[in-house]
Image: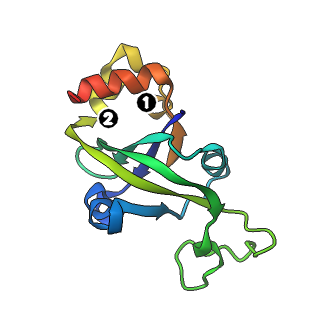
Amino acid sequence: MNHWLFKSEPDVFGIDHLAARPNATEHWDGVRNYQARNFMRQMKVGDQAFFYHSNCDPPGIVGIVEVVREAYPDHTAQDPESKYHDPAATPDNPRWFMVDVRLVRKLPRLVSLAELRDDPALIELPLVRRGTRLSVMPVPEPAWRHIISMAGD
């Protein structure tokens, strides 16, 4: 099993939005960065990811989700009404992909970005590196376990 991190703004689609979906499951759409897309294409059913709230005060990890459907074409890319529309995406060349995720659990507490940055054990975590702005990224196994312990989970 691999581990990942998904970023989302809580006022756009937060962990409570996911919890309110049928079976606490939803597709993760709108990824428009090739590296983040490629990470999603590597995901397998059963992989787990941190749910990270971004562009809020304070930003941080709030829960855990599980991949329940592997990458498939992101339909929002072909929808002219969608803010994620990409005229270059076609049914024959979908270009963008999404996965389905299910909420596993909320963490007992938010693990803030400041805490993550200040922890020497997480120096290699892509999230804390300057200039890393990906909305989807891998989380190494040692960092995964360490963050779980930080959350008191």
Considering every residue shown, the one lying at the far top of the view is 120
> Could you say where residue 73 lies in the image, as x and y percent from the top left?
66, 66
Mark 1: amino acid: Val
Q: Position of residue 114 (x, y in %)?
A: 29, 31
Residue drawn at point x = 31 percent, y = 28 percent:
148
Q: Is residue 57 above or below residue 71?
A: above
Sequence-wise, the earlier of marks 2 and 1 is 2
Q: How is the image coloured?
A: rainbow
- The residue positioned 37% from the left and 14% from the top of the image is 120
Q: Which residue lies at the image location 33% right of the left edge and 60% below the top edge?
A: 24
The residue that disc 2 covers is 113
Drawn side of residue 130 relative to residue 22, left or right: right
Residue lying at the far right in this picture: please name it.
Answer: 92
Tag 2 and tag 1, C-beta contact below 8 Å: yes
Q: Nearer the viewer, residue 144 or 8?
A: 144
Q: Which residue is mark 1?
A: 128
Which quadrant is the N terminus positioned in? top right
In x, y percent, where is residue 84? Answer: 56, 71
Mark-to-mark CA distance, 2 and 1: 8 Å
Q: Is residue 37 above or below residue 92?
A: above
The amino acid marked with disc number 2 is Leu
- Judged left or right of residue 47, residue 43 is right
Work out which quarter of the rendered image holds the C terminus and state it.
top left
Q: Quadrant of residue 149?
A: top left
